[in-house]
Image (spheres, helix red, strand yellow):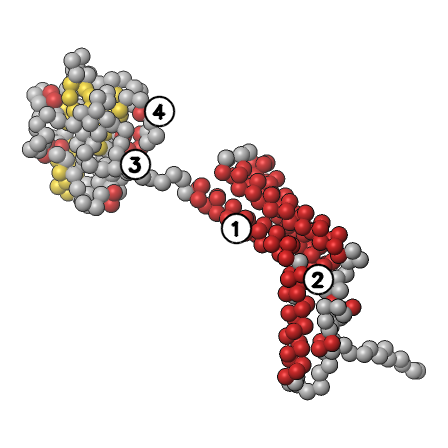
Amino acid sequence: MSTTEEHRTPVSLSSVTADSPHMQPAARNPERVERWTAVLLLLGLLGFIGFGWAYWVDATPWILGATMGAGFSFVGIAVVAWGKYLMPKGPFVEERHDLRSSDAEREAFAAAITQRGGGVIKRRPMLGALLGGGLGVFGIVALFPLLRSLGPLPGKTLERTDWKKGSYLVTQDGRRVHVDDFLINEVATVFPEGFEETENGQAVDQTIIIRLDTEDFVTKKGRESWGPAGYVAYSKLCSHLGCPVGLYEQSLQLLVCPCHQSMFDVTIGAQPNFGPAPRPLPQLPLFVDKDGYLRSQSDYLEPVGPGYWERS
C-alpha cells in the first residue's frame, strides 16, 4: 500500500503583506460590502438613539423593544459582515525550526499582526468611526434606565411638608375640623386640605391632633399661640425611624410609637422621655379662624421624620 503526502510550501509571515493574496478580503467587491456595512452601522446608531429618546419620553414598551432590537441587530449584522468579508483570510503559516524565533522573524510577525488587524481599521476609518460611535451612543443610552429609575432629586422635599399658612385641618375623609368637634383627650389624624392632590400626599403630611384643654395650651416658651382652645398638633412620623406614632396614653398624656416604644410627652412639646427617638416630634402651629375651624399658621418649622433627616 502506498501513501501520498500532500506537500504544502510554508508561507513565512515575513513575506505576508497587505498586498499578498493571503491578506486580501474574502469579498469579491470589498468596496460594496464596506458601503453596506457602513449603512448597517449607521442604522444601528440611529436605533440606539431612538431607544434613548423612547426611554426618556416614557414611550410604550413595544417602541422601546423595537428601537433597542433594531440597534443591536444592525450593529451585529455589520460586525459579522465586517469580520467575514472585509478582514483578511489565511492560512498563515510560519516556518519555525528553533523554539525561539530569530529577532528578524519576531519583528516580521509583529508587523504582520499589525497589518492583519490594525491595517484593516486604518484603511477603513469610516467603519471604525461608525462602530465606535454606535457603541459609544449605546453606552450613554444604557445609563438612561439607571438615571431615570432613581427618580427626581429630593431637593428640599425632606425639609418641608404640604402644610402652609392657612391650611385647613381635615380628616382622612376630607372633613374640616371645627373647634367644637373634640372632647378633652380626644385624638385624630389630620391632613392639610387638598392633600390627595399634593406631591407628598399622606406620607409626610400626616399629623396627630389632641385636645388637652378648653383654653389655649402652651407646650413650650415661644409657642404661646400654637395651641388654641387646648388643641396641639404634632407630626405623626416618629423621629427615630419614621413609624406612625398612632398610640395615645391618655392618663399619662404620652404619644407612643408602636415600633420601638418611643414615648413623647405632648404637654411639653412632644419631648421624648423613653425609647430610642433622638428628638421631639415637630409641633404644627395652629389657629382658629372666625368660623371656628382649625387651621395651620405655617408649615412645620423643622423637618419631620427620622432624626437623620436633620443634622443640626
Q: What element carries label 2?
A: loop
Given the image, on which type of amino acid does mark 3 rest?
Answer: Thr
The mark that comes first in sequence, 3 or 1, is 1
Which numbered marker is on residue 59?
none
Task: Give me the C-alpha separation between circle 3 and circle 2.
Answer: 58 Å
Q: Nearer the viewer, mark 1 or mark 2?
A: 2
Which residue is denoted by mark 1 in the rendering? 139
State the residue in front, 101 or 3. 101
> For the residue labelled by badge 1, is the local secondary structure a helix, a strand or a loop?
helix
Task: Measuring from the top left, give residue 145's x and y in whole percent.
Answer: 48, 43
Residue type, label 4 = Glu
Pointer 4 or 2: first along the chain: 2
Mark sitting on residue 157: 3
Cα separation between marks 3 and 1: 32 Å
Cα separation between marks 4 and 2: 62 Å
Q: On the image, numbered disc 4 is attached to which residue?
A: 197
Q: Residue furthest top?
A: 291
